């Protein structure tokens, strides 16, 4: 009887560490769109120092614009470049330009292990012919994925209003077509609200989470989001009527472990104050999630 009681008590105690592990562990970074702040940091080092002082894990790279300079500045401050926002321009029977495939490969090679390169895709030829365009760009993305695999770098398409890939569904479809372990999909809350609306987001997260490599969030308003301006759809974290915490919670509960970025486009005011409040909201999300049963 004593042995049975001891075993039962031991099993009960073993459950406590499991419960304590219910945490949000995702890298939290800022997108590299800080220009609208009144006192916007100008140089790579100014950006790195600002984010370090607040507590962010890192900053998004911005294509090939001073890529190595930004990478060095972040590393000197003990920060990461978890994602890099890189243009991929493709047309029929021509090689990508500005940047070229070789230039993109150089960025991939210089990236740290685990970095996600998310491409914003552009094509005048195929913008209205996605079926053919997907065939063309898939060939390019497979070549880049195979190259990136040797450096443990991940790739995906970044959904953006008005670009070739506008939706998470399309980003996910490209991941299916490319069919490489290091090629996935991305989800961008503000662009999702603008293009698709807020209805059914939870089911979309559940569908796409297994292939997601990168997610961007922000404060936003709910409602008729497709007819809202950006000042309603991109707000500091903690602002707006949309349940961004619920969005994050659903992501984590469906197994998403990748980086989560703060959408900063056209945020105004004092950079330290606005970014600090958003970071404190993120910390609140983590605390709330860990305390919920």
Image (tube, rainbow, N blue to C red):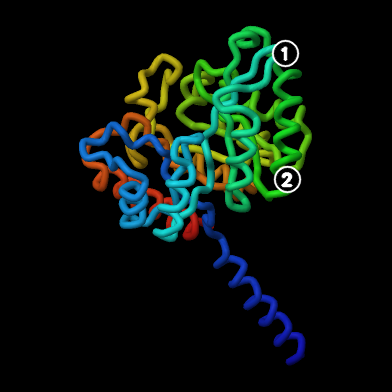
Quick check: 78 left or right of 182? left
Gap in angstroms between the C-alphas marked 1 and 2: 26 Å
Q: Quadrant of residue 224?
A: top left
Looking at the rendered structure, the secondary structure element under dot 1 is loop
Residue 167 drawn above or below residue 148: above
Q: Position of residue 283 (x, y in %)?
A: 39, 54
Q: Where is residue 214 in the image (x, y as percent from the top left)?
A: 57, 40
Q: Which residue is drawn at 50% across and 48% down?
A: 81
The reply to whether residue 200 is in sight is no
Mark 1 = which residue? 93
Q: Where is residue 258 in the image (x, y as percent from the top left)?
A: 58, 47
Residue at 64% across, 18% down:
90
Q: Which of marks 1 and 2 is in front?
A: 1
Q: Can residue 272 be seen in this view?
A: yes
For marks 1 and 2 on the same chain, the one whose residue lies earlier in the sequence: 1
Q: In the rendered view, would you say 153 is above or below 103?
A: below
- What kind of element bears circle 2? helix
Q: Which of 206 and 173 is in front in this view?
A: 173
């Amino acid at each position: 009887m004593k042995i049975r009681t001891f075993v039962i008590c031991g099993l009960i105690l073993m459950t406590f560490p499991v419960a304590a592990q219910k945490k949000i562990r995702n890298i939290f970074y800022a997108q590299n769109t800080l220009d609208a702040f009144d006192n916007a940091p100008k140089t790579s080092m100014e950006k790195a120092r600002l984010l370090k002082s607040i507590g962010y894990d890192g900053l998004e790279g911005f294509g090939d614009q001073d890529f190595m300079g930004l990478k060095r500045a972040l590393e000197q401050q003990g920060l990461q470049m978890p994602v890099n926002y890189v243009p991929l321009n493709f047309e029929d029977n021509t090689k990508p330009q500005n940047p070229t495939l070789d230039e993109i490969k150089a960025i991939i090679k210089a990236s740290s292990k685990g970095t996600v390169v998310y491409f914003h895709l552009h094509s005048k030829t195929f913008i209205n012919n996605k079926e053919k365009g997907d065939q063309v760009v898939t060939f390019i993305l497979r070549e880049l994925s195979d190259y990136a695999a040797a450096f443990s770098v991940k790739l995906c398409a970044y959904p953006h209003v008005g670009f070739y890939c506008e939706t998470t569904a399309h980003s996910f479809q490209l991941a299916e077509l490319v069919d490489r372990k290091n090629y996935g999909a991305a989800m961008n809350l503000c662009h999702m609200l603008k293009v698709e609306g807020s209805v059914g987001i939870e089911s979309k997260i559940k569908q796409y989470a297994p292939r997601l490599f990168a997610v961007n969030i922000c404060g936003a308003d709910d409602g008729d989001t497709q007819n809202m301006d950006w000042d309603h759809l991109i707000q500091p974290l903690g602002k707006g009527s949309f349940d961004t915490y619920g969005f994050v919670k659903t992501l984590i509960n469906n197994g998403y472990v990748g980086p989560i970025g703060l959408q900063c486009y056209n945020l105004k005011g004092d950079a330290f104050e606005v970014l600090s409040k958003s970071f404190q909201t993120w910390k609140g999300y983590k605390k709330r999630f860990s305390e919920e049963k």
